[in-house]
Every structure is written in structure tokens, then in C-alpha cells.
Amino acid sequence: MTSSTTGRTSAGAGPTPTGPEQGTGPGTGGALHVVQLLTPDGRRADAGEDPEVVAHAAALTPEDLRGMYRDMALARRADTEATALQRQGELGLWASLLGQEAAQVGSARATEPQDRVFPTYREHAVAMVRGVDPADILSLFRGVDRGGWDVAATGVSPYALVIGTQTLHATGYAMGVQRDGAVGTGDAGRDACVLAYFGDGASSQGDVSEAFVFATAFQAPVVFVCQNNQWAISVPAERQTRVPIAQRASGFGFPGVRVDGNDVIACYAVVRAAAERARAGQGPTLVEAFTYRMGAHTTSDDPGRYRPSVEVEQWRARDPLTRLEAHLRRDHGTGDDFFAEVARDGDALAAKLRRDVLEMPDPEPSTMFDHAYAAEHPQVEAERAWYARYVAGLEGEDVAEGGAGTQGGAA
Amino acid sequence: MSAIGPDGEPVVERVSIARALNLGLRAAMEREPKVLVMGEDIGALGGVFRVTEGLAKDFGEERVVDTPLAEAGIIGTAIGLAMRGYRPVCEIQFDGFVFPAYDQIVTQLAKMTHRSRGAMPMPVVIRIPFGGGIGAVEHHSESPEVLFAHTTGLRCVTPSNAVDAYWMIQQAIDSPDPVIFFEPKRHYWDKAELDPAAEPYPLHRSRVVRPGTDVTVVAYGPTVPLALRAADAAAEEGRSLEVVDLRTLSPLDLAPVEESVRRTGRLVVAHEAPVFLGLGAEVAARVTESCFYSLEAPVLRVGGFSVPYPAARLEDEYLPDADRLLEAVDRVLDT
Ligand SMILES: Cc1ncc(C[n+]2csc(CCOP(=O)(O)OP(=O)(O)O)c2C)c(N)n1
Ligand SMILES: [Mg+2]
């Protein structure tokens, strides 16, 4: 990313588009330039944008764009199925990504296989783009495990449920990448960066500020991707910040960019530029994807208690999928066949996801004693043995020998 | 709606723990203008468990503060507000999310009275929904009470029913010391008859909630309803359990426990927190010391295991249930 981008976005000297990107209340809008490369009606609009960002967008082939659409549509379909599964009692909870498909698919597609991403609990599309089987996400929400995917193979860290915590881990991981000599070599297959996802609410956490401090102090190859979806459960973004979140970066000494989070092309290009900066050893960037949480916070939430439905309607007009569809139809000759095929694939994915979830075996009780420590721990082993005797006793076996005592303690 | 009738007379009604807490908070806020309520999503939403429902509307945003998402910020600013003469009641959304504030609680809140030689008391209440059994995802089912009870300067209490919830929250707010107030989240909707004109039981007192003769069972918070169920089951088999609701975890009030153990000679302590270094260890050690010659069997503890709280589909196996409690009862009786 060029320094002119940095200067312009941080100083807020760019054009001042109106509309929902400017926030729903005082404070978070401001006169910060919002990078948008695809208008809500699906037209490409590169004028005045950072040439490096524009170049990344221009390099996207129609096939890439159709791939982006596909990723967004499949993620949305999986998300819809997960919501239905929760309603039917098959999941304990679900955190829907509805409305955030562009921010997630665009940013994830800007990563390389050797990169690593640190998600919150809502980055289902990011995980899927990186090759995580959605069933391995739903296992967490079904309560059979803590998320079943292979972290090393996918480069997707486990979901973080404690708000903000993962931004520090991402920064530390990036410091490791740096120490391994995997930045600034110019070898595109080797240089790596780290993406740290977090929300507008998370931006208030001390951990996030500390992550910014460490990342800038060590020029760590990390891209902070804030999906500002306007809400932290019931609390609007303006309770967390009175300036655009992207603008915070300048106070820490690294660039911040606000991007239209419902424009998948802009999200891709801006994160791509930030990622290349990081891989080249030029330090962190904060990307604020300005978007909207179209659904409830989770299936336990009731947004009718705190936000006006007219706001949701306003954002519905800026749907990230409709926008890319319009663009593909107008400028790339993509026709009904493609969209019908994607819809069919989505239904097949959803059907498989449902089958996989319904077939997930409940975990063996004794597995709760597994992996509490990496090396054997006598206390845990004593409790494991006690529990086995206890269960056998319930089932009528004679376990008198060694059966006494407090749950593995002496007695 | 409140437990006060149209002519200001108290009305007896059946209320849930969540509602009783709401009524208790209202009563405290009406009595004392310095009482503030603060936390995440406690305004328009009324808190994720609806404990603060309607308070923002009735008392205004100056007194019901929907905070930014930062627990260290919530407790740290509550300390400052207390220095300025306010009585903040802070809500932590779930047990697992208190830890960003742990530094403020342990190094500052707990020590300010001592550090200032009493000049700066800290009348701060921290409400924490705790315990499991609700099928939640990670960090939503923890029982971290001993981490706070172990810290000098913090008082720790937990109501097990709506009546106690109503009175104890008000008594906690009246306390000149910081009080960590643990709410048994899986029982938020359990109802009891609340008479706001009744005489409240003291905050830092334990209480026998079911008399019995064979074995004393000590419980607190979510394990009290469990112990009562176990006592019912035991009664059918002709064994009589006496159940003591600890109510106060720091200071401990073991007088009713000791009195009971002197009669029964047998004690089982039950909590959801891991047994290892749990509150049961302290109770066992003290009762062994004070009732050594009355004990007919070793004191047994029933509780969580020394593992991270498991995924929801295993929590029934992890959590102590009536069977586990009764198995311990059998063992102390067999000795
Ligand atoms: C430390 C901590 N405090 C509180 C919570 C409860 N909580 C879960 S999600 C959430 C709101 C997060 O908002 P934001 O960061 O904007 O992310 P979003 O949910 O909008 O994606 C809160 C308060 C938590 N998970 N962790
Ligand atoms: Mg948000």
C-alpha cells in the first residue's frame, strides 16, 4: 500500500459519501474516505482510489469474481441451514454471519496458504474459504467439541469467544513469522502474514489496544480486520468509539483504511494490499470493513428490543450478494445458469451439512479427561480412574476395591 | 410492575430469581441515589438474562450505564466512581468474562480499603452469573468463586433462591466492602414466594434449608436445589439428609454446619467448581478441626473434575448430579 493511501485515509481528506456507511449515529461516521470499488447497483467505480488497491481489483478475472460470489452464496446457505438446525434443537447456539459475507470472503481470499487467520466466533465464511468443513464449525455450536478442524492444514485458529483476546495471539504469531524469516524475502510462496479478525465491540477491549501497541512496536506482519457491523449485541458502535475505528490506527503509528464491507471486491483489494505490505515487512495495517449484522447477535438474541427494523431495511438494499450478482450479469455476461448452479450447490452443501450434524456422535464421557494437559497429570488420571469406577458402579459392577474417596482424591 | 402495590404496600408474589434481583436493584436504587448499575447490554436489552429489565427506562442513563465492551474498564471506572461516593453495581455478562477485569478486582478493588487505612471504602458489587447446565458454548459455564473468595478484601456471596436473591442483592449494595455476587444462572427462572415486608436474613449467614439426621450436605448456589432433590430421593430410601445452604463464601459461616455435623457425624460438600482446592476443601479442613470427635467418616467432596469445563454435550457427566451426591452419601454412611 502506498504512503499516499495512508496519508489520505488517515487524514480523512477523501470524498465523503453519504449513506449507511457513514454510521447510524453520531461519532462513528466522520469524514473518513470509504474505499468502494463496486457501487450498490453493481458498477465498478475505481476513480480516485489508491492505484495499488485498484490494481489488485483489476487483476481479478471473471472466474475469480464468480468464485467470490460462489463463496459468499455457499457461506450464506450454510449459515441459513445452521440457523434452522438451531431452531430445531440440533445446535445449542448459532452466530449468524448474514450480511458480512463480502467482508469475510473478500478478506479471506486475500490470504495465501502460508498465512494464518485468527477468527472470532462469526467468521464462518473466512473458515470455509480457507478449507474448513462447515460441519467442523457446527460441532462447536452443537456442543460436541470446541471446533473440529485441522488448524495447521487450514491456517485457521480456533474460534475465540472471549472478545478481543485473539488479536494478541495473532500479533504474537506474526512476531514468530517475522523471527522465522518469513517476511520480506520477496519469495511469494514464503512470505506470510496474519489476519486478526475482531468486531466493533471488541475495539474497546484493552487486549485490542495492546495488540496494536505490540504490532506497531515490532512492525509485526499482521492485518487487523475489524468488521464493524454496527452492533455489539445491543450496544451501537458509537458507544465504543467517537471516531471511525480505522482512524485509531494513526494514533498507534500504522495505517488504517475504511472499506465498504459489503463490497467484496474492495474488501479483497484493500486487505490484499495490507497483506502484501505485511508480508513485505512493512508492518501492520488496520482495515475497518464497514458492514452490518443483518440478523440477531446469536440465536439467543432478540434485536427487536434494541434496534429499529428500518435500519435493517436500509442495509438490505446494500446486500453484498445482490451487488456482485448485478455486476456479474452486467459486465461479465454471467447468466441464470451460473446462479442456478450455485443455488443447487448451496442446497447440496446444506443437505450434507444437516446430515453430518445429525450424525455427529455425542462424545464419550471419558474424553473430558483428555488433553487437559499435554503431559500426563496424576490428578487428572486419578479422577479419570475414579470416574470409570463410578460409572461401572452405577451400572451394577462391583467396584469396591479402590472405589472410595473424593473423586480421585485419597480416602 | 414491582413488589409494591398501588398504595405503596408490599405485595407478596411468586417471582423468579432474575425478577427478584431486578426488584432488589430497584429497591436499592430508589432508596439510595448513589447506586449506579453498569455493564454490557444492561440498558435497552435489560441484560442478557433480563435482570436489569426496565431499569434504564425508569432510572435513566446516568444511573443505568450501558458500558463500552471492556470489563477492566467497567471495574476500573467503578473503583473511581466509588472513590467519588457512588455505589456501583457492575454486571459481568458471564463468569468466563470476568478475567479481563481480574487485575482491577484483585490488585485494586480488593486492596483499596487497606491501602487507604479505611479512608477509601469500596462499596462496589460485582454481579456474576455463574455455573453450568445451560448447554452453553465455552466460557459461559464456569465456577470461579474460589479465585475471589481466596482474595482478602472481597466478600463473596451467592443466593440459591429468589427470596435470598431479593434481600442479598440489597444487603450487598449496602455493604461498605466490595461484594462479588454469584448468581446461579441455570436457576434464574426458578420461582419462590417473595414477601417484601418480611424480615431479611443476614447476608453473611449460612442456613439449614432442610433439616435431617443422618448426613449433613453443604451446598451453595446451584447445588442447593440439587442437594434438596438428592435429599428427597434419599428420604424415599429411608435416609435423612440435612442440607445447609452456605449463602456466604467469604466470610464463611460454618456455625450451622458444625452444629449439624455434631448431630449427624457425617458431611458431604457439593459444588460445581472443581473439587481440587475448591471451597469444599476449606469447609472440610475447618470441620475436621472443629468437629473431629463427632465425625464418623471422612468428609467427602462432590464437584467438578480437574479438567476444563467440557463441551455442552458432556456437561451432564461433568457436573455433580443427585447420583454423584448420593453415592458420596452412601460412602459416608458405609464408613
Ligand atoms: C470478554 C468478553 N466480554 C463479553 C462477552 C460477551 N459478548 C459476546 S459477543 C459480544 C459483543 C461483541 O460485539 P462485536 O465485537 O462488535 O462483535 P460481533 O458480535 O458484532 O461480531 C459480547 C459482549 C465476551 N464474549 N467476552
Ligand atoms: Mg459488532
Image: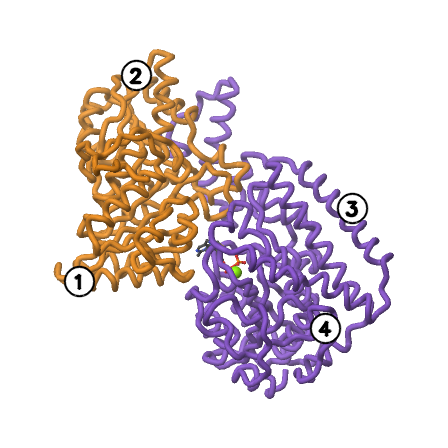
Q: Give me the chain letter of mark 3.
A: A
The reply to whether discs 1 and 3 touch (Cβ–Cβ < 8 Å) is no
* Residue to which mark 2 is pinned: B240
Taking depth in this image into account, of B99 and A245 the one nearest to the observer is: A245
* Residue A205 locus on image (x, y percent): 43, 64
Which label was assigned to residue A348?
Answer: 3
Respond whether the residues carrying marks 1 and 3 are from the same subunit: no
Amino acid on which disc 2 is placed = Ser
Using residue B278 as the reference point, say whether residue A206 is left or right of it: right
Q: Residue type at mark 1: give it.
A: Arg
Could you say which chain is coloured purple in the image? Answer: A
Sequence-wise, the earlier of marks 4 and 3 is: 4
**Residue B115: assigned label:** 1
Spot occupied by residue B280 in the image (x, y as percentages of width and height): 31, 36
Q: In this view, does B180 lie above or below A404?
A: below
Element on which disc 3 rests: helix
> Mark 2 and mark 4, same subunit?
no
- On what subunit does the disc labeled 2 rest? B
Which residue is tagged 4? A189
Residue B143, image quadrant: top left
